[in-house]
Amino acid sequence: MKKLEDLLQLGHPLLYEVCEPIAESELHLVKDWVADLHNVMQEIRAKYNFGRAIAAPQLGIMKRLIYMNIDKPVIFINPELIDLSDEKFELWDDCMSFPNLLVKVKRHKSLTIRYLDENWQAQEWKMSDDLSELLQHEYDHLDGILCTMRAIDAKSFQWRA
């Protein structure tokens, strides 16, 4: 079982790599990966008081997998973002891989995410506002992009109070 100390920190080379899609033959591995993601997210919540979702590469699992748990657990296998709105908004983004740093970024106000669920069934979910932002952040991890790379300008960084 992975723990908080297994979470990759800012600067780790794997955080900048593009993840591979999960093959249907690997579906049996997803349950253990999700258990690890859930465990580490719970530890982040307990220590830093934030965390609604986590991407597999943050634990060195270089697969296109996102785990979200707000009201209930949701597993996004091989997600695709489509129908991104032209309208954007600014916010202070945070990341479990650098929990004391906030980064001001612009995100699309709404989008649709297509993905496979834990039963390999195709799903689609239209999201807006904070959920849209959250999934854009996690999706970026799958492509080796950190919010530090999306900072609006050189003054878009601050320490968490």
Image: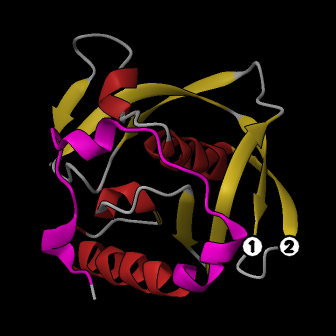
Identify the residue at horizontal 41%, vertical 33% (top origin).
145
Q: In the drawing, what numbered circle is on residue 121?
A: 2
Residue 80 visible at all: yes
Q: Answer above or below: position of 1 versus 77.
A: below
Q: Pick whichever, 30 or 151, lies toward us.
A: 30
The magenta segment = 2-30
Q: Residue at x 17, y 44 (%)?
A: 12
Disc 1 and disc 2: Cα gap in Å? 5 Å
Residue under pointer 1:
117
Depth check: give the residue in front, 48 or 143: 143
Query: Residue 157, percent across and down?
Result: 22, 27
Could you say where residue 73 lies in the image, as x and y percent from the top left?
60, 81
Marks 1 and 2 in Cβ contact (< 8 Å): yes
Residue at image position (76%, 30%) is: 84
Of all residues shown, which one is farthest toward the top? 153
What kind of residue is marked 2? Answer: Gln
